[in-house]
Image (spheres, helix red, strand yellow):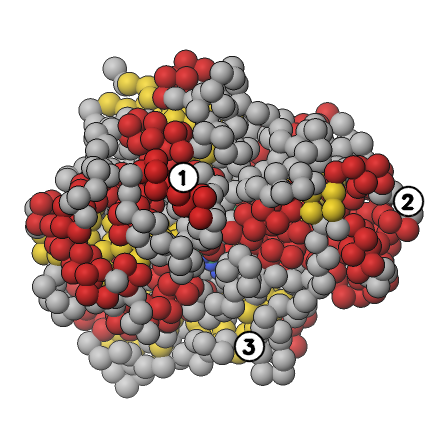
Amino acid sequence: MPTITKSTCCYCGVGCGVLIESQDERITGIKGDPDHPANYGRLCSKGLSLPLTVASDVGRAFYPEMRANRDAPRLRVDWDTAMDTVAQRFTEIVRKHGPDAVAFYVSGQLLTEDYYVFNKLAKGLIATNNIDTNSRLCMSSAVTGYKLAFGADGPPCCYDDLEYAKTVIFAGSNMAYAHPVLFRRLEAAKAKDPSIRWIVIDPRRTDTAAMADLHLAIEPGTDVALFNGMLHHLIWEGLVDQAYIDSNTDGYTALKNLVREYTPRMAADLCGIQEKDLIQAAEWFGFSPAALSLYCMGLNQSSHGTDKNLALINLHLATGQIGRPGAGPFSLTGQPNAMGGREVGGMATMLAAHRDIGNPAHRAEVEELWGSATLSDRPGLPAVDMFDALLDGRIKAVWIVCTNPVHSMPDIGKIRAALNSAEFVVVQEAYTQTDTVPYADVLLPASSWGEKTGTATNSERRISRVRQAINAPGEAKADWWIANQIGRRIQHLLRPELRDLFPFTSPEMVFDEHRRLTVGRDLDIAGLSYSVLETQGPQQWPFPAGESGGQTRRYTDGKFLTPTGRAQFHATQYQPVAEPTNARYPFHLLTGRLRDQWHGMSRSGRVAAAFSHAPEATLTMHPVDAERRGLQAGSLVTITSKRAHVVLPLQVSDEMQSGTVFAAMHWNAQFLNCGGINEVSSSAVDRRSFQPELKHAAVRVEAADLPWRILAARRGDVLKIQASVQPLLHECAYAAIKVEADLLVLKAANGEPPAGWLERLYLALDLPTGTDTLEYRDAQRRIAKRAVWDDGALAGFVFAGEATSADALLASLRQGQPWQGSRLAVFSRQTTNIIADRTICLCKQIKASHITKAIAEGATLNQLKATLGCGTVCGSCVPELKQLCDRGALAPAIGASK
Ligand SMILES: Nc1nc2c(c(=O)[nH]1)N[C@H]1C(S)=C(S)[C@@H](COP(=O)(O)OP(=O)(O)OC[C@H]3O[C@@H](n4cnc5c(=O)[nH]c(N)nc54)[C@H](O)[C@@H]3O)O[C@H]1N2
Ligand SMILES: Nc1nc2c(c(=O)[nH]1)N[C@H]1C(S)=C(S)[C@@H](COP(=O)(O)OP(=O)(O)OC[C@H]3O[C@@H](n4cnc5c(=O)[nH]c(N)nc54)[C@H](O)[C@@H]3O)O[C@H]1N2
Ligand code: SF4
Ligand SMILES: [Mo]
C-alpha cells in the first residue's frame, strides 16, 4: 500500500501543498493537496512532474567527498572526516585572518530550519555577517522597497486578493510561466468577471502579456518612467486619494514635484510606448475599486530595482490602493522559501527576525537570546561583492549550500576565477553534476525534496510544513543537521566557553528557537508551532501568542512600521540600465524563465517531458533584426558582451521587439558547452539592494562560423548517457544536449574537429566498433559517420563533418523497431530540416501540429479541450492554447519553433 505524505512543492514561491505518494522508499506519485489554501488541489506542470525528478538516483550525491588539493580527484570519506575537516579549516582561517575571511553562500530553497542554523553559525558563532544567498539575485530589491516604503519587509497582500482585484498589473512578471497556479486563479476570476482589466508591463510579448487587455511593451529598464508618468496623470486628473495621502503618508510633496516633469507624453516616449496606452493604464488603475500589482524579476533584477519597486508602491499609496481586499503592491517571491530566509535574517544585510545589523539594540537582543559571541556590526558582503572578495583574497573560504553560483551568478567567468583562487570551498549539494561541484574541496551530500522535514513560507507570508516521505539515498543528510553538526565542532574549537549554540536534535527544536526570536517583531509567530500547523494547517504571519490565526492582510488600518507610523513616498528619478546599447553592442539582452524548467535544471532537467515544450537553448530575435543581419532561424549565432561570448541557435519571433533579444536562464554546462547566458550577463548592482542586473546586458549578435558539425543520438538510460557526454561538451565552440524519453540527442559545432574528440564521443555514447556497427569516413572532407545497432534495431549514430539533419534516423531510433532493408541506407535515409514539433500540453502530451490542425479546422479553446484533452489537467498550457486560437489557424511561429 502506498503511503501518502502531506508536504509542499519545492519549486516556486506559490508554495502549493502536495500529497506525496510513496512505497518502498520510492516516490511513486503526487497530487495537489485539496486542503492547502495556496492551490486547493491544483499543481502546475513542474509540480506534477516532481516524482519523475526523483525516479532515478543517477547523479545524486551519495557520500561526502574530499580532495587533497586542486589537482587531485575527490574521494569518498566518512561524515566525521568531512565534518572535522570543514570545522578545522574554517577555524584555522578565522583564527589567522579574522571572522570576515570566511563566507556562506546559501539559498532561498533551504527550509527555514536549515537557514536558521546556518545564520546562527555565521553570525552567532563565527561573528561574521558574510552570509548571503541567491535571494540577493531574486528578492532583495523587493525587500529594500518594502522596508523603505512601509518600514518593514514582507508583502501586504494575500492570495485571496487575486480574486478580489478588478485591475491587475503584472509588472516584470511572466506569471503564466513562473507562478502558474496563482495565474490559474486569476484566469478563473477573469472568466467569471470579464470587466476585470489586466495590464502587463514587459518588453516581451510573453504568454502572460498575450492574455492582457493592455500590454505595455516598454523599452527594457524604463519602468520608473512609466510609473512616474502614470502618477502624473493620476494627480492631474484628480484620481489620487488625498485623504489617504494626508493621514497615512509622508513625502508626497517632493514626489509630486518630481513627477510634474513626467508628462504622459514624455514618459511614454522614454518607454517607447504610446501616450494613450500609458493614460489607459493609469485610468484603469486609478478608477479601479481594487487595483493589485503583481511584480517579480523584471523589476527586481535591475540596477535600479529598488527605485522600480518604490515607484510602483508610490502609485498604490497615492491612490490608497493598499490594505483592502484586492488592492496592494504584491511582490511575488521566486523561490519556495525566499520568505523564510528573510524571516530568519539569513542575508548579509539583516539580522534574525527582520532586525538590522546596524542597530545596537537589535544586536543586543539577538546576542541575549542566543547567548552567543558579540555580533559583528560590520555589514556582510552581498553575493556579488562576496565573490569579488573571494577573488581578491579578502575572503579565503566559502561554504555554498543549495545553490549553483557557477551557473546563476552574473559574469560566471569571474565566479570561476573566484572559486579557483579560494583556499577552501565547501559545496553542500544533492546532485553531483552541477557547474559548481567541480570547485568543491569538500562535497557534502544533502537530502532533497521528499526527504526533508521543516517549514517554508510562501509569497503570501504563509508557513507550511514540509514533510519527509522517504529516506535520502546513500548517506545524504538534511541541511540543518549538517550545519548543526559542523557548528558544534567549530564551537568546540573556537568558542568552547559559550553556551551550546547548536543543541538541536530536530527541525522542530530549531523552529521553536526561531519563533522565540520573533516575539514583538512585525513577523511575530509566537503563537505558531509545529502542532498548530499540524492541527490547523498552513498559517500566515504575523501570528502572535494568544491569536487564533495569522494576519490575512497588513496595513489595513493605514498604520505603517516606519518611525512616524506613516508610509513613505520616495521621489524616484528614472535612470537607464547600467549597460546601455551602443554601436558595438547594439542589442539589449533580456533573460528569463521557461515554463517547464527550474533554474539550473539539476532536477527538472532529469524529466524528459520537461524538454518537449522548449527543447533547446536558443537566442530569440525579432524577424526584422534577423533579416537585416542575414541571420536565419536555426542558424548558430555568437552573442558577445564586454565580458564573454556564447554560441546558440537563433530563434526568430515577433514576441520580441526590434533591438532586444532574449535567452532563457536555465541552460548550463550540464547541457551546453558553456555555463549558459550568465557567461555574458552583467554584474552591475542596485546601490541599495545590491541585487545584480541579471535582466539587462548589451550584446552583439553575429553569425557563428563553425563549419564542422556533429549530430549524434543514442538510445538508452538518458541520465547515464548525459553524465558521460557532459565532460566533452566544453571542447566545442557549441554543443548542446537535448533529451527525449529514452533518447539523447547531441548537436555540436566547431571550426575543426577537436583532437581525438570523436573517439571520446564514441566511447561516451557507447558506440563501439564491431559487427553491429557501420562506419563511413572521408578524411579529406572531414566526414565521419557511425551507426550502431542493438538487437536488430538502430541504437545510436554520430554524423560529423557537414551540416546534417537526420530526422528519419531519429524517428527510427525513437521507435526502436527492427531495422528494415539494407543497413547501408543508414547514411542516405535522411530527409531535410527537422521541423520542431513542440509538445504544448505536457500532461496529455499533445503536440503543436495536432493543435494547429484542429484550430485550422475551426476548433475553439473549449473544443480543443474536449477533443484533444489538452489544457484539462494542470492548465499550464492554456495561455498558449488561447494564443494559438486567437491567432486563428495561422502558423504558430515564424522560424525554427515558436
Ligand atoms: N517555470 C519556472 N518558474 C519559476 C522559476 C523557474 O526557474 N522556472 N523560478 C522561480 C523564481 S526563483 C523566480 S525569481 C520567479 C521569476 O519569475 P518572473 O520574474 O515572472 O520570471 P522571469 O522570466 O525571470 O522574468 C519576468 C519577465 O521580466 C521581463 N523583463 C525583463 N526586463 C524587464 C524590464 O526592464 N521591465 C519589465 N517590466 N519587465 C522586464 C522579462 O521579459 C520576463 O518576461 O520564477 C519562479 N518560478
Ligand atoms: N541571467 C539570469 N540569471 C539568473 C536569473 C535570471 O532571471 N536571469 N534569476 C536569478 C534568480 S531569481 C535565482 S532565484 C537564481 C537561482 O539560481 P540557483 O540558486 O543557482 O538555482 P538552482 O539551480 O535551483 O540551485 C539550487 C541547487 O541546490 C541543489 N539542491 C536541491 N535540493 C537541495 C537540498 O535540499 N539541499 C541542498 N543543499 N541542495 C539542494 C540543486 O541540485 C541545485 O543545484 O538564479 C538567478 N540567476
Ligand atoms: S505553482 Fe507549480 S512550481 Fe509553483 S509551487 Fe505550485 S506546483 Fe510547485
Ligand atoms: Mo529567484
- Determine whether 529 is above or below 678 in the image: above
Ranked by sequence position, the earlier of labels 2 and 3 is 2
Density class for disc 2 (Cα within 10 Å; few <14, some 14-19, many ≥20) is few
Numbered badge on residue 325 = none
Identify which residue, 176 or 769, lies in the foreground: 176
Say what amino acid the circle numbered 1 marks.
Glu
Density class for disc 1 (Cα within 10 Å; few <14, some 14-19, many ≥20) is some
Residue 623 appears in the rendering? no
Q: Gap in Å between the C-alphas at discs 1 and 2?
A: 47 Å
For label 3, the SS is: strand
- Name the quadrant of the N terminus: top left
Q: Which residue is drawn at 49% across and 16% down?
A: 546
Q: Which residue is drawn at 13% across and 55% down?
A: 88
Q: Which of marks 1 and 2 is in front?
A: 1
Residue lying at the far bottom in this picture: please name it.
780
Identify which residue, 342 or 4, lies in the foreground: 342
Q: Name the residue under label 2.
A: 238
Q: Gap in Å between the C-alphas at discs 1 and 3?
A: 52 Å
Say what amino acid the circle numbered 2 marks.
Gly
Q: Gap in Å between the C-alphas at discs 2 and 3?
A: 45 Å
- Name the quadrant of the C terminus: bottom right
Q: How many marks?
A: 3
Q: Name the residue under label 1.
A: 365
Q: Mark 3 points at which residue?
A: 700
Q: Nearer the viewer, mark 1 or mark 3?
A: 1
